Image (spheres, rainbow, N blue to C red):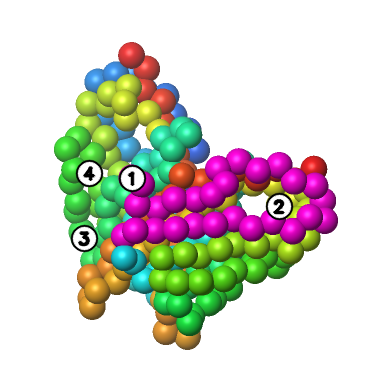
Amino acid sequence: ILNVEQSPQSLHVQEGDSTNFTCSFPSSNFYALHWYRWETAKSPEALFVMTLNGDEKKKGRISATLNTKEGYSYLYIKGSQPEDSATYLCAFMVSTTSGTYKYIFGTGTRLKVLA
Amino acid sequence: DADVTQTPRNRITKTGKRIMLECSQTKGHDRMYWYRQDPGLGLRLIYYSFDVKDINKGEISDGYSVSRQAQAKFSLSLESAIPNQTALYFCATSRQQGERLETQYFGPGTRLLVL
C-alpha cells in the first residue's frame, strides 16, 4: 500500500517566523510530487510540481525541495504572514504497471499564522 | 468564470436514493478526476478519465459510477446512497503534453450529506 505522510499535522507560528514541513513518500516508481495550498472553504490550488531529484522551486516566500532517493520533500515559508494560513497538501504521483499513473494525496499540514 | 465547476455545491439526500454530481471544465484538459475528502483523511481518488473513451477506477470506486459525456464533462453517480458516502467531493482536471506534466486544477467541491 502506497502511503504519503505529512508532518506535522498542524502548527501555529507567529507572523514573521519562518517554518517548514515535510512530505514523505515511497521512493519507488516515482513520477512527480505536487504541492497544493488549500484555504478553508476553497479548493486546492497548485503551488509546485517537482519531478527531478534535487529540484528546488520557489514562488515568492514559499519554496520547496525534493529528494526522490530518500523519499521526501520539504516546503518552506519564509517570514510567515496571516494570509499564509491554509492546509498544505502534497500529492505523490506514481507510475503504474499498466503504463498510467495515479495521484496519492497526503492528509496535509494545517498552518495557522498568528498576527 | 471558474474554469472547473461543480453542481450542486451542496446536497442532502436520503439513504437509497440515486444522485448525480456533475463537473464541467473550460480548460480544455483531457484528464478529469473525482475525489472525496473526509475529515482526517487525504483526498482519495474515486475514478479518473484520461479521455472520453477512457474510464479508470481509483482506490475507492465501490458504490460509485461515472460518465464522461464529453471532454468537458465528467459526472459521478451514487446509485444507492449510504450514510458513509457523506463527504466533500472534488472534481479535478489536468493535461499532459509530452514530457511536461501539468498539475491538477480543482473545482469548488460538492458537500454531500446522506441521511
* Letter of the chain that mark 1 sits on in the rendering: B
The picture quadrant where one finds residue B30 is bottom left
Compared with residue A9, is residue A47 higher up or lower down, i.e. above or below? below
Q: CA distance from mark 2 to mark 3?
A: 40 Å
Q: Which residues are magenta?
A: B1-27
| Res. B1 mark | 1
Q: Position of residue B101 (x, y in %)?
A: 28, 68
Is B22 a magenta residue?
Answer: yes
Where does the image place residue B47, in percent across and percent down from the top left?
56, 67
- The circle on residue B13 is none
Q: Identify residue type, mark 3.
A: Gly
**On the rendered structure, is A17 left or right of B18?**
left
Q: Nearer the viewer, mark 2 or mark 3?
A: 2
Chain of residue at mark 4: A
Residue farthest along the top direction in this orientation: A115
Q: Which residue is mark 4?
A: A63
Q: Is residue A6 left or right of residue B30?
A: right
Residue at mark 2 shares a chain with residue at mark 3 = no
Circle 1/circle 2 CB separation < 8 Å: no
Q: Which mark is residue A54?
A: 3
Specify whether B44 is left or right of B81.
left
The quadrant in which residue B66 appears is bottom right
Residue drawn at x 60%, y 62% as measured from the top left: B76
What residue did someone put label 2 on? B85
Q: Nearer the viewer, mark 1 or mark 2?
A: 1
Which residue occupies the foreground of this view, B74 or B40? Answer: B74
Instruction: Name the N-terminal-most of marks 1 and 2.
Output: 1
